[in-house]
Amino acid sequence: MSADSRLNAAFAHAPTFPLCRSSRYVLFSDCHRGCGTNNDNFLKNQNLYFAALQHYYNRGFTYIELGDGDELWENRSFEAIKGIHNNTFWLLSRFYQEDRLIMLYGNHDIVKRKKAFVHRSCSSYLCSTSQERELFPGIIFYSGAILKNTDWGRDVYLTHGHQADFFNSVLWRTSRFLVRYIWKPLEATGFLDPTSAAKNNTKKKKVERTLTGWAGKNDCILVTGHTHRPMLDESVSYCNTGSCVHPRCITCMELEQLKLSLVKWTLGTHPDRTLYVAREVLAGPFYLR
């Protein structure tokens, strides 16, 4: 099966959600929430992410996660991840309770496509007082989703993007084995995984070319994650949210009033040397055309 066929399959039964001038969506990807060890790349940005999540919750945005939200290749236990980042899951559960949460799976959390895993692992979590609370009972993790433009302009297609990466889609079990038992211990010594599109620039560009080509053929705006490289250009149909594991920031996309913006959240410093969480628009807003 070709990359185009895999992308087509991701949207074959994709749910559609309305997109109009009053819609407010925020798109995140590649959080890679871990279990609090040295390999937990999300840990250093957890406060930035939580602050951003509060911002979007208070302003009525619908949160969409484009896969790889949790690092389930390096970690076997989802319970440990929920325990370490229970404040994040508490806030995500509030989005879900208000029907403002849409979740997709990527290659690193592909097990979420199994209903048995979701029922067993995503229905509840232990809060900070060790009480069990509802998380996402009855949730479905999708391979793709479509924001159907009801006003004017093109539809927005959402998926993780690993479908353009043969090794991390077709051979994902082999890739998971290598990550879990070879690259994970080597990462602690500074060695980068050469099979990862996020860490291999040659592979990253190849994946981006494939995704750009597919978006052009289907006359849509395609938004993905996977490569970790944030990308938004008014003249290009393919966009990327970036990730939450950049060295000093997290990136995401805002879709509001039929306009897309690429946003960075980082730690800023006031003249009196106090710290604050800063929001910066990196690109846009661009109208969906």
Image (cartoon, helix red, strand yellow):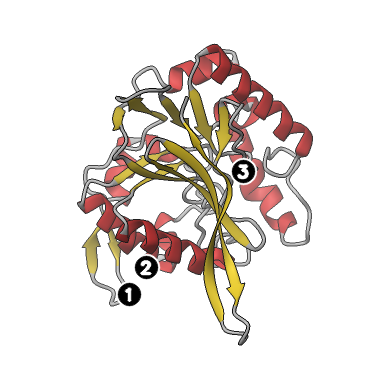
Task: Find numbered disc 1 in the image and state the secondary structure of the residue it sits on.
Answer: loop
Up the image or down, 23 lies above or below 3; here it is below
- Mark 2 or mark 1: which comes first in sequence? 2
Q: Is residue 208 visible?
A: yes
Look at the numbered discs 1 and 3 and tell me whether their residues touch, using CB distance below 8 Å.
Answer: no
**Residue at left 61%, top 32%?**
168
* Residue assigned mark 1: 128
Q: Which mark is residue 230?
A: 3
Horizontal and vertical percent position of residue 75: 52, 54
Q: Which tag is nearer the camera, tag 3 or tag 2?
A: 3
* 266 vs 171, nearest the viewer: 266
Task: Find numbered disc 2 in the image and state the secondary structure of the residue it sits on.
Answer: helix
* 191 vs 220, nearest the viewer: 220
Looking at the picture, which amino acid does disc 1 mark? Ser
Q: Is 139 displayed left or right of 185 in the figure?
A: left
Look at the numbered discs 2 and 1 and tell me whether their residues touch, using CB distance below 8 Å.
Answer: yes
* 224 vs 120, nearest the viewer: 224
Q: Is residue 135 visible?
A: no
- Mark 1 or mark 3: which comes first in sequence? 1
**Residue at left 32%, top 36%?**
21
Up the image or down, 75 lies above or below 152; here it is below
Looking at the picture, which amino acid does disc 2 mark? Asn
Horizontal and vertical percent position of residue 1: 56, 13
Q: CA distance from mark 1 to mark 3?
A: 33 Å
Looking at the picture, which amino acid does disc 3 mark? Pro
**Residue at left 28%, top 77%?**
129
Which image quadrant is residue 128 in?
bottom left
Q: Which mark is residue 87?
A: 2
- Mark 3 or mark 2: which comes first in sequence? 2
Horizontal and vertical percent position of residue 125: 30, 61
Which image quadrant is residue 217 in?
top right
Q: Is 64 displayed left or right of 18 in the figure?
A: right
